[in-house]
């Protein structure tokens, strides 16, 4: 069974956004979005807003071969 994408409210997103955990993602769009939301959070965006944006990238790229590995890294 494929890995499930955590809900926006899952604490894993906040850990990635704040940098307290740093999964080794392989998909370029995910890597770029992680950096973007980390910077956005530092300049005042909420964790919830950043989490929704980051999760959205996973959803939009759900058919990409290496995205499944990135989901499992969560």
Image: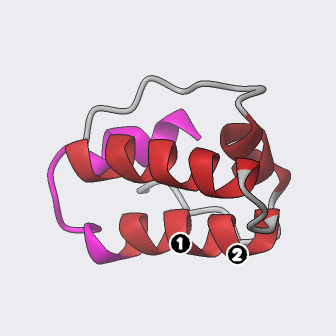
Residue 29 is a magenta residue: no
- In the picture, which quadrant includes the C terminus? top right
For residue 44, above or below residue 42:
below
Magenta residues? Answer: 60-74
In the image, residue 7 lies at what x, y percent?
A: 70, 71
* Residue for point 41% across, 53% down: 33
Helix, strand or loop at label 1? It is helix
- The answer to whether 51 appears left or right of 3 in the picture is right
Mark 2 vs 1: CB contact within 8 A = yes
* Residue for point 41% across, 56% down: 2
Q: Mark 1 points at which residue?
A: 53
Residue 69 found in image quarter = top left
Helix, strand or loop at label 2? It is helix
27 or 45: nearer the eye?
Answer: 45
67 or 3: nearer the eye?
Answer: 67
Residue 49 is tagged as 2
In the image, residue 4 lies at what x, y percent?
A: 55, 61
């Amino acid at each position: 069974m494929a890995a499930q994408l955590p809900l926006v409210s899952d604490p894993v997103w906040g850990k990635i956004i704040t940098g307290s955990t740093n999964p080794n993602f392989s998909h370029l769009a995910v890597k770029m979005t992680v950096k973007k939301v980390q910077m956005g959070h530092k300049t005042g965006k909420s964790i919830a807003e950043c989490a929704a944006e980051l999760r959205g990238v996973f959803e939009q790229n759900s058919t990409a071969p290496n995205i499944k590995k990135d989901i499992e890294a969560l």
